[in-house]
Amino acid sequence: MITLQAKTRMKTNSTQVSYFTLRAYFDTGLLRYFYFMIILSLYILIICSNLLLIVVICMNRSLHEPMYMFLCSLFVNELYGSSGLFPFLLTQILSDIHTVSASLCFLQIFCVYSYVCVQFSTLAVMSYDRYLAICSPLQYNTHMTSGKVVLLIAVTWLPSFVAVSMTTYLSASLQLCGNTIHEVYCVNYSIVKLACSDTRVNNIYGLIVSAFFIFGPLIVILYTYMRILKVCFSGSKQTRQKAVTTCTPHLASLLNFSFGVCFEILQSRFDMKAVDSVLHIVLSLYFLTCQPLFNPVMYGLNMSNIRVMCKRMLLL
């Protein structure tokens, strides 16, 4: 138990933090330029691949179907999430002093966490779309109208932004007794751990948001895939082929992103001093660096309509 005297001392030592120090970075000497070029090349590749698929979907009327509209939303989110990390990362790699202003740190928290919420919500909506297309093909156009598509896309973005705005506000309102973050980018839980004030509201709200935007979509995805599998086992060979073609990229994307997020959650909650520093950095950046490239590659290669349109556009 913390005594009243200790609490008073902690509050006395607390200050309005204007910047945070990122301790996960270490001196790499001239190798920093090599790492800079690798990260820059990866960022350019992410921008080009996602933009290409967005343009392909928007420019071709044959792809103006619900499934491709949801994919377009997914690719926009990849660009959004990448922009919240890569410019910041490139600046820090070349810097000798790894500090970030408090306002920029909270802005990055908002971008990264809203990216995660939108990602899980979009994957859930896509699984619902595949469920209707495979399990109720005759009623698909009746259920999945253009108005409903717009509504579902709005539902994946707006609630995520509202929920994460509140998360960021609660963290920014805390009294902090330190400004050191042992990460390569700003993580909300790392800032909450620096608080001298009561963090029960932050923790409870964080659990509610996690349950709603992570476990909620996962339950929807699990239910829809159980129904899809049931139809596949009892349906025709054509139905099974359609399910495999459209669901394989979605499942691969879901598993890749879920593992990446799990790595980050485990690292932020447990002491990782025994883990090699390079491995720690790679695992913490995995879902923000691999997923934005993984999705366009998976969907671009596995979905024939997109693949054909991309080839036509690149040959022009």
Image (cartoon, helix red, strand yellow):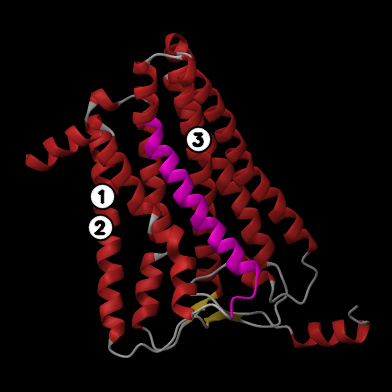
The magenta segment? 246-273
Comparing labels 3 and 1, the label whose residue is closer to the camera: 1
Number of other residues with Cα within 10 Å of mark 1, as a class: few under 14, some 14 to 19, many 20 or more? many
For the point 43% across and 55% down, which residue is it? 81
Seen in the picture, residue 146 relative to 204 is either above or below; the reply is above
Q: Are marks 2 and 1 in contact (CB under 8 Å)?
A: yes
* Image coordinates for residue 41, horizontal then vertical, percent: 24, 65
For the point 58% across and 40% down, which residue is it? 218
Whole-Å distance between the Cαs marked 3 and 1?
24 Å
Seen in the picture, residue 238 relative to 122 is either above or below; the reply is above
Disc 1, SS: helix
The residue tagged 2 is 45
Disc 2, SS: helix
The residue tagged 3 is 154
Which amino acid, mark 1? Answer: Ser
Is 260 inside the magenta-drawn segment?
Answer: yes
Q: Main secondary structure of the magenta part?
A: helix
Residue extending farthest left = 316
Q: Earlier in the sequence, mark 3 or mark 1?
A: 1
Q: Is residue 84 visible?
A: no
Which amino acid, mark 2? Answer: Leu
